[in-house]
Each structure stands twice: as structure tokens, then as C-alpha cells.
Amino acid sequence: MGLRMSLRSIGLGVSVLFSLSRFAAASPANSPSGIDAISAYAGTWKIEIQRVDTAHSKAGHENSVLRNSCWKDGAYLACNQYVDGDSKILLVFTYHEKDKTYTSYQIPQDGTDAGKGKMLIEENVWTFPWQITEKDATTYYRVVNTFTSRRRIEYRQEFSPDNVHWTVMATGIENKTSDQ
């Protein structure tokens, strides 16, 4: 869901996350590519999340306002991410042209260790995958953002024990209310 980068929502997806919209698929010549594609996340988004009970999530509903203050400098795109008005994390994105993958670096404001994650973009679908291994068992997670327009993202958060069969932990929508 967007760029939120925690187990709860990586992609902002852990969350941000995180794919251009159907407008990109319809007219690829007009769509940004490479690191410029990430600029689609810039702006203020109204978020609605519906969580379900699973082994890795608890049922609930939440609403928030996410603002991504983004800028590009050279080959980097960075976003200071605000949740309900509070600066929460700095996200720095890079792009690897050869394998068409993005890397996100999540830098917490409290100085704790930065995180690192991958993001894959296929037309209007942006996926933030990651995995956690505990006691010789690996659980795979992902946030899948689908841009249905330039101003709307439908997303889901999922987990899998085998990286094949996925269980939905949460679904939601993000509606862009303003640019940058």
C-alpha cells in the first residue's frame, strides 16, 4: 500500500510501496520509466485499510492520510513520508536498468538501522516482496499495489509459506487528494 514500509504495510509498501496505472499500459510513451516512475507516489493520499484475521495479522479497519514529499537528484528518488502529519521515514529509491528492478532504502528518523527492500514494476502493478526466516522456516510477504488510475491505488498485503500460495492479510485503497 503506497510506500509504507513496515510489516503492516511495506512496500509504502514496505506498505509504500509501492507499477504505473492503466493509463501507463494504455499509453507507455507518456509514462515515466526507470527511477522517474516512482514519482507517481508523490503527493497526499487518503488511505483505507481493511485487515483480516490470519496467522500474521489481526482484523481491523484503519484510515489515515499519507503524504510523500518526493524529490529526484541524479539517479536517486527520495520521499519523506508523513503519516497523519508526522514525518515517519525517509525512503530512497534506486533503479537497476539491466534487471529492471528497484531497491528501496527505508531510513527511520530515530537513527535505528535502515531497511532495504526490492520493488518490481510490471505495467500498473507494483510489488514489494520480502521474506522473514525464523527457526528454519521462511515466510514470504508482499504488498501488491495496482494503480487503477493516476490517482487511485488498490492494494493487498499477503503472506505465503511457499512463495506460491498466498493468503490475504489486508486490502485497501489509496486515493490521491493532492500532488506533492
Image (cartoon, helix red, strand yellow):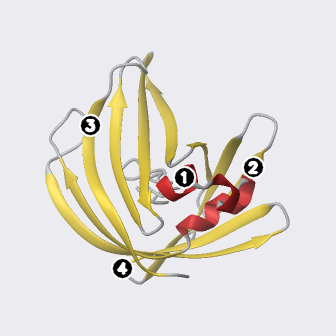
Pair 1/4: label in front: 1
Pointer 3 residue: 168
Query: What secondary structure is marked by label 3?
Result: strand
| Quadrant in which the C terminus is drawn | bottom right
**Height in image: 134 above or below 126?**
above
Residue type beneath disc 4: Asp
Tell me the kind of residue under disc 3: Val
Q: Residue at x 28, y 56 (%)?
A: 172
Distance between the alpha carbons at the discs numbered 1 and 4: 33 Å
Look at the numbered disc 4 and give the secondary structure of its residue: loop
Closest to the observer, 80 or 19 = 19
Q: Earlier in the sequence, mark 2 or mark 4?
A: 4
- Label 1 is placed on what type of residue? Ala
State the quadrant of the N terminus.
bottom left
Q: State the image quarter where residue 2 is shown.
A: bottom left
- Taking 84 as reference, is 36 above or below it? above
Instruction: Answer whether labels 2 and 3 touch (C-beta < 8 Å).
Output: no
Residue that mark 1 sits on: 26
Residue 56: where, in percent of width, then height? 27, 37
* Lower position in the chain sequence, tag 4 or tag 3: 4
Q: Position of residue 104 (x, y in %)?
A: 64, 52
The kind of residue tagged 2 is Tyr
Query: Which residue position holds label 4?
Result: 84
Q: Left of 130 or right of it: where is 106?
A: right
Most extreme residue toward the right, as rendered? 74
Proximity of marks 3 and 1: CB atoms separated by less than 8 Å: no
